[in-house]
Amino acid sequence: MTKIAISNQKGGCGKTTTVMNLGAACSAKGRKVLLVDLDPQHHLSSWLGFEPDGNPTATELIYYAVARQPIAYDNYIRHSKTERLDFIPSSALLSGMLGIIAQDSNSAEVLSRIFDDEYFSKYDYIFFDCQTALDLLVTNVLKCCDKLLIPVQADVLSYEGVEQMIDTFIKVKNDPDIRKYILGMLVTMYVTNTKHSAQIYEALKDSYGKLVFEQYISFRTEAKNAVGYNKSCVSDKNSTVGMQYSEIANLIMEVCENETI
Ligand SMILES: Nc1ncnc2c1ncn2[C@@H]1O[C@H](COP(=O)(O)OP(=O)(O)O)[C@@H](O)[C@H]1O
Ligand SMILES: [Mg+2]
């Protein structure tokens, strides 16, 4: 089982879109996938068609983990009706858990405690959708994950945030050799008919070399439209974005599955 964080403190760079589509792509290739929504704005949960159902969410999961209460994990898992994906939904109250996590005697590892549980070994991949921040909740995800993928929108502002993200990651892992954890930087919303995206892509390559995926994700309206159908782009055989995410999923599976053999 591999835990993958999809994180960048820049908003709107394609984190949620990447979680949904990589999850769907790995699932389409026969892997058992869990998506964990850790953004109080719960866009991923909404995309998956989630509506509050009386069962607990990621908010309660963290609350009980800090309280050192026994957790019935089955109650937290939902099954998408439209995709072959399991997920743990988020709620707006998740933002209130920051203060709760901070009170834990081992506040850096609350999520590690949860997801190291034997229960989760039935999954091949767990993808974490992080909120747009580098706060204690996100650093908990970074600590807990085996791998990190950083989506970078093909614009200048998001490119600048990557350095800070990497610095934080080094501190969290307490290991200067972070290459073994980084799956790559994925350039998203790439626009082919202007030079701008190409310039950002090249600048990123100059700075980070092989850490940048050759395959980028194009800017296409189908990525936005998929949300309304509660579907991934991967499930649409004609979707360019779907095919691109499938390609990235192949690379990820190659890395993760060859390491564990
Ligand atoms: N490849 C793409 N082409 C066009 N729009 C995209 C693409 N990827 C994401 N978007 C849109 O950009 C916005 C931000 O993406 P999102 O995945 O929600 O980012 P984040 O989770 O980092 O805030 C959303 O409206 C989403 O539908
Ligand atoms: Mg998001």
Image: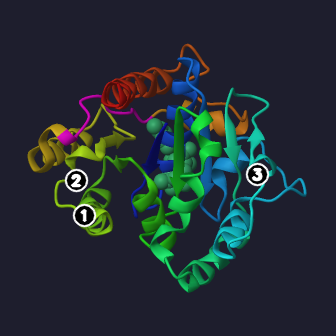
Q: Residue at x 53, y 32 (%)?
A: 124
Where is residue 210? Give x, y as percent.
Answer: 15, 37
Instruction: Characterize the local packing of mark 2: few (<14), some (14-19) or many (20 or more) Cα atoms within 10 angstroms.
Output: some
Q: Are marks 3 and 2 in contact (CB under 8 Å)?
A: no
Which residue is more in the foreground, 41 or 80?
80
x, y percent for residue 151: 37, 47
The residue sitting at the right extreme is: 54
Which amino acid type is marked by label 2? Ile
Magenta: main secondary structure equals loop
- The residue tagged 2 is 178
Which stretch appears magenta?
211-219
SS assignment at label 2: helix
* Mark closest to the chain's N terminus, 2 or 1: 1
Judging by the rendered image, the residue that carries numbered circle 3 is 76
CA separation in Å, label 2 and label 1: 6 Å
Q: Give the farthest residue toward the top.
A: 237
